[in-house]
Each structure stands twice: as C-alpha cells, then as structure tokens.
Image (tube, helix red, strand yellow):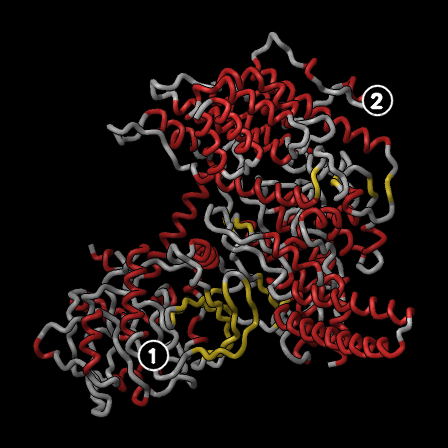
Amino acid sequence: MSDKYRPPPSGPRSQRNYSSSYGSSSSSYSKDTYKPSGPRRYNNNNNNNNKNERDSYRTDVYKPTPSPSLEEAAASSSSSSSPSTTVKPLSTQSPIRPSGPSKYRERDNSAPSTDRDIGSKRPMIPSGPSSFKKQQRDYSSSFVGRRPEGPKGFAPPKGPREFQRPTSSGSNRYIPSSSSQSIELPKLSPSQIYSIKVTRSSKIFDKVQQVGEGTYGKVYKAKNNITNDYVALKKLRLETEREGFPITSIREIKLLQSCDHPNIVGLLEMMVENNQIYMVFDYLDHDLTGLLTHPDLNLKECHRKFIFKQLMEGLNYLHKKRIIHRDIKGSNILLDSTGYLKIADFGLARSMKILNDGESPDYTNRVITIWYRPPELLLGATDYGTEIDIWGVGCLLIELYSRNAAFQGYDEVSQLCKIFNVMGTPTKEDWPNIHNLPWFEMLKPKVNVSSKFNSLYKSIMSPLGFDLASKLLALDPIARLSGEEALAHSYFIEDPQPEPLTFLKDIKGEWHEFETKKRRRKERKRLQDEAKAKQQQLARTESTVGDNSMKTDVDSVSETLKKTKTESEFNKEDPNDIPKSDIDTGKSEIDDGTKSEMEVDDDETVYAVKEVIEID
Amino acid sequence: MDSFEAATQFSQILRNLTPSLQTLTKAAHFALKNSESEDYLFPTIIEVISDNSIELNTKSNLFQFIEVLINESFYFSKQSKYNHPYVQNLKQSLPSIILQVLPNVNNSNIYNVYKSLIKISKQFKINSKEYIHQFNVSLLNDDDLKNIDDNIPFPQIGISEINKSLDPLLSAWDILIQKKRQSEYERLRLLNHTEFESEDVAEDLMFSIKEKSDKSTTLLSKKQILWRMEEDRESHKRSKEGLWMVNRSKEDNSVGEEEFLNMYWNKYDVLNHEEDKALLDSLGELNKIVAASYKDSQF
C-alpha cells in the first residue's frame, strides 16, 4: 500500500549530476521543484534514521516542529557535502513557498511574501494529461495572474491539492516571517524531501540571445543565475496549437528522456513560465554548419575524425535504441569549444515500430531537410528504417572536408537530380529494387549518368574518409552501412587518431547556423543596396548620355538587383527548417514546398558569406 | 434532376477531382444518389477517363475515385434501397480503365493504381496476394533478358492484351503486372544500351518532365510532379487516420471475433527466446530504476 505514495520512477536522466546546475547537492532547500527524484538522492541522502518517520509524514498533515531550525539544518547538511558558492545563505534567501493547494495560495496571498516553508514530501504523483492541465491552470492562476514578475524556473508543481494543508489549529501560523528567523520545520529530514516549491525574486534563467528558430518556436541561449552555467532554452510555440500541448513535443520529450549518451543533447528540465513552455537543454557554442562557415577554421584529419566519430557514436546509440532521428543536418549537430559533439533536435524523431513479417512500417516520407534527404525518401519510400539517417551523416562527412553541402537541391526533383549527377544514375547492380518505390515511375532517369563522386571528392578527402563516405552514401538503402558497421570502418581505426579541437577555444564568438544566416542576410542587404545605388547612378548617367551600350549595362544591373531581391525574400524564413507537425500523427502540417524553395539561395551565397566574414 | 442534367454535372465534378478524400467521397455520393441514372452516369466516367485532354494527375484521381465509388456502393448497399450500383459496370471496365490511367508512354500512376487495386480486390473478396508479390519482385524472364540484349523495345500493351475469359478484376491485375514488367524491361534496356553521360545533366533531361510549351497530357510538368508528391503524402496520411476503426454493431459494443482476430491475435506472435529475454531485461531494468527511486530501502 505504501507504494502508492511513492514518487514515480525516473529514467536514467535522474542519474545525472543535477547538482552542477543547482549549486551544491545539499542545498535541497533552494532547489526548484521540477526534478525527477531518483536514485541519486536516494543513494546520497538516504538516512536510515528517518525510516521510522515514514508514517508520520504520510498523513498529509503538516506538523511544524520547532527544531532543528532551518539554519541548523542547512548548516549541518552543507557541512556534510561540499559548500556551495552559488546558493545564497538561506536566511537571506528570498521567499520559499511550499507548493500545494490553490487554497493555500489564496491564503498565502494575504500573508507577507516572505513566507517560507520547506520539507514536504509529496504523497502522491499526478499522472496523465488531465493532471497536467490542472497543474498548468494552477500555476498560471497563482503566478501569472498575481505576480507578473513571476518566479522563474518553475515546473508545474507536483502533488495533490490537499498536500500540506494546515490542519491543526496550532499551525495556522505555519508560515513564519523571515524577520523572526525562527524557522518551523516539518518532521521530515532533508533527505526525505522530494520536491519543494520555492519562490525567487529573480529569474533563474536570463536570456542572453536568440540562437535558433524554427517552426517549433525559438531557441535562446540563457544563463542559469544560480550556477552561472549556460543552457539553451527552446520555447515551444503553442499559439498555433488548438488541440492543447502538441503531441509532437510530447514525442520529442519522451524520446529525449529515454536517451542518456554523451553525444545526445541532454534535456535538463522542462520549465513553465508566463504560460510559455520551455525545454531546457545543454548549451553548446557552435553547430556544425555554423562552424564550417568560419573562415579561420582549419580542421585536420584527426579533428574531422574526432567530430565524425562522436556523430557516429551518438547516431549508433539512437539506432540501437530503435530511434530514427529523421532530421540529421549540420545545424542539428552541436559542438562545444573543444569539439565535443551532441546530436540535437528530436522534433522529427520517432521510435521504430515493431512489425511482423510482411508488414510495412508506413512512416511519412516528409522528413529530413531536403539537402540531407536520401534518394529513397525522394522517391516516396514509406517503409524506411535507420538507413535514412546514415545518408545524412554521409553528407556531413563530405561537408567536413568540402565545407559545403554536397547536394543542394531546392525541391525533390532537383535534389534527386543533383544526387544522380554526383553519384551517377543507379544501375541494376547499384540498386536492384529501385523500381518498387512509389514515385520511381514519375522520376525515372531517362538517361544514364556516370558517377562523378570520385573526381569531385577523392582529392579533397583522405583515402579512408572517402571510402567511408562512399559506403555511407550508397544509393540503395540496403547497401548503406549501419551505424555499427561504420564505427568498425578502418577510418576510425587507422592513424591519425581522433583529437579534440583544442584550438576552438581561441575562436571568437559562437558559430551557429542561425548567426551565420544573419550575417548572410546582412551581406545580401549590403549587396542589394550597392546594386541599387549603382543603378540609380547609372540611371542618372543614362538620362544625360542616353547611350545604348550603357543601357544594356543598366539592364544587367537591374537583373542583379532582382536576383538579390529574390534571394533575400527567400531567406526570410529558415530554409533548413522542416515541418514539425507532420510526424505520422495525421495532424496539421506545414507546407514542404515553401521550405524547399527557400533553400535555393544558399548554394550561391556561401562564398559571398566567407568574404563578408573576412571583411567584418 | 433529370439524367442528362445529372450527367453534365457529374462530368464537371469528375474533371475537377482532387485526391482529397472529401472530394472523392462527395463525387461518389453524387453518383450513388443519382444511381437511377447509372445508364448515363457510368458512361460519363468512361468518357472523362478516356478524354485525352485530361491530365495524368487527374486520371490518377479518377482511379482513386473509382475505388471510393466501389467502396461506397458496397457500403450503401447495406440498405435495401441500393443494389450495388456501378459495381458490375466498373468491374467490367477495369482493364480498359487501367489502360487509360497508365498510357503507354508514361507509367507514373502505376503505384497509385496498384494501391487502389489492392483495396478494390478486398471489396470483391479476391485474393490479390499473388499479384502483390509479383508486383514487388523482378518479373523479367529469360526471353525478356534476351530481348533486352538485342535491344528490342517492349511490345505495346493494348486492349488486345485483355483476356476476355478471365474475371475482369484479375485481368486488370494482369495488365498492371504487364505494365510493371514493361517498365522494368525498358529501364534495363536503357541501362544496357545507352551511353553514360559524364557531364551534369539538367532536370528536364534527367527525368521525363514536360516542358512548359508542351501541351501533351502524357507527361507531367515539374510542378505537377511536386504537386502529385504532396497529394500522395496527403492521402498516405489520410489512409492512416482510419487504422483504429473497427466494425461493431450498434447493439453490441464488445469486441467481436473478427475484430479480435485482426486487431489483436494476428498482430502479435509468440516471442522468441531473444525477444523474450529483451523484454524481461528491460522490465528488470525498469524495476531497478523504480526500486532505486525510493528514498527508503524497500523490503
């Protein structure tokens, strides 16, 4: 029966060291509420002498005890572990409030905002969507309405409403004023605290700047004011959701929670603030696309290997867990300042179905940003597997050497054409079953093209790197290497051995695709302005001279002007962004077409950008 | 509405078909509501589908419409008022309809026809397993391979191919398989007998794409191809929306024998040793996590 009161099992994530982002592990008083309780605290803090208190705290009755005082408790607990430098002393700390019933909050309303309470074990865990809603409502009514300056960093409070309601007459004043310094403690010892709700006068996360944007919403770099660590805040875009919390985000969260690997981005916590929902991630300084546009970046074979090995290991981990990422591309591969890599953005990922013989998995083929989309998806395959991610990393391996995406099409037809032009049109041996793909008859090559892969890339890649790339980029998905096979490739075994990118520390700034694009846009605008000025000048000259040859000149300029204009129009939205909502859910979706249209320009502007950066 | 009026209106509906299920069902319902005019409406279907000015995409939609119409007709015929209107006529004409939807020069619609034909076969309770298998394997025989070596074009598939003695639905399958074989044959012939280009090839030379000036309807323009991909994705998504649906009688809302068999029993196999172990392992892992999450040691 007691199991009923137990907290939910938490996944491997709970084994992470959360204390790093929260100050010392002993400062559980000041901890934020959202945190799956788990083995770590169980292991660290379990005191056997608390066992006999179990029954007393299970009664939902709040029993203040005069001693030990909070200070004492804090002192004793902090002395038992490393002292925290980031957490303020508790006595000066701004209001700590217990989470709990809304009724309690109403009461609290009249009380001074310096209320403090700690140490309540939540007896029951709400589960399921209905309780989520309740929590949300509970939260917004109590924080957003009443306190516009709202405390930051709160997850929905956990625990039932009855929780902690003062029952005995003696506990009417269970909220001590902070000035009196006499803290009433519940009977619980810190080790038994599963979650406390605290109120802070300042935000936990301060947004530093925006670092990404997509259909899902925006990503910000933010600083955790307690630990001074940087995190990435992904703000979910909920305005467009008419049917509540998007199921695609639930899928993303679920998948991220199940992952625990150094090369997969960590979902640290979820945060609700001002009716916005944030996912809090590890922050890394660069992404692969952004980094590769850096003009001074000089990668050696060992560095490329370092990056690519981590990428393969992360991907292999996912594939072993039967997860298909479905949006592998440079801007989703994050790198820190020594080249440690994490795969991010699981907005399109899904776990594979378990199928009986003869069944087709029947997934949507509208996945993966078009440049990294493998030929079978371009030909309409719906029965794919993890091979579709392998194509993407194959493209990225080339990109590590050439710095440019290998196949830059702007729609499905041109994308396939580009692939066939480089890899050659598939022969019967290359891809025997190509004719069974749904759109093959529609996009059947009517000429034979020989492969230019060798001549294009062999000279710029190392022999083994080239060999690996050609095996990852096999046209036939069956022939493509699996993640495990790729890791066994001699590319990773032979010298030079992978080496961290220590020189990255010297690189100024942070290089994400988002910022790179901003620079590009700026440059485009400059070019446009220049062309405009030139045109005006020419127009003036023309009106005075009226020369024919001059006229053609004007035409050519206005041509360029037009071109720049369309380019900048194209780039208004994120070209490498992919619709998030069409993930086999049969729900609303975003047009793929507009997206691909926008990709037209990057091809031509990459070089221009490089120049700009140097100018800058 | 008199028959003539209905036929005119119907023709308009068919010419403007989109592959959205709503439009297709609406058109099918129009046909069924006016089923007393079948003698006029059915020829309208044939007339529209044989019209050379109709785009290939529309022809694909028309074939999907035929699938929906057959389906709806079966459904309507649960009421005594209806006696499977259009069904026999459509079935009889299936082979020639397929030849219209898959004209000799272009087999773009083959996959959609294949998908629809599977569903139609289900309605007529015809086992299409063998055909489905054939459609998905290589169909070329030794003679074909020899002809490919000799660079002989695949013979045209026409009305004459239709085996009149065979059930028209089976005959339709035969034609479809022939078409598939033709396509495979021609691809191999191209691979074996055409030089490989070493220069970059533009899209319109790489694929069979209609140029803007070309008014023929046997090829798709690039825009139409992209449009068609979008529509196919759309209908693919739709096809999954009904996966959870089951057939239950109004009176009794419990799981029937057939439902149990199809939705549950046949879906799961006995776990083999490996799967069994994997399951137990993950359960054991879960148990460990749960146990570790308690603050107080258990048991």
* Residue B152, label in figure: 2
Q: How many marks?
A: 2
In the figure, is residue A271 to the left or right of A171? right
Q: Amino acid at mark 2?
A: Ile
In percent of width and height, residue A152 lies at 38, 77
* Residue B221, label in figure: none
Examine the rendered structure and indicate whether residue A323 appears above or below residue A52.
above
Can you identify the residue that label 1 sits on? A148
Mark 1 belongs to chain: A
Cα–Cα span, label 1 and label 2? 80 Å
* Residue appearing at x 35%, y 19% in the figure: B81
In the figure, is residue B121 to the left or right of B77? right
In the figure, is residue B233 to the left or right of A60? right
* Residue appearing at x 43%, y 71% in the figure: A18
Res B237 visible = yes
- Which image quarter holds the N terminus of chain A? bottom left
In percent of width and height, residue A334 lies at 60, 66
**Corner quadrant of residue A251:** bottom left
Mark 2 surroundings within 10 Å by alpha-carbon count, few (fewer than 14), some (14 through 19), many (20 or more): few
Q: Amino acid at mark 1?
A: Pro
Judge by depth and name the residue closer to the eye, B113 or B6.
Answer: B6
Mark 2 belongs to chain: B
Examine the rendered structure and indicate whether residue A472 appears above or below residue A63.
above
* Residue appearing at x 74%, y 37% in the figure: B215
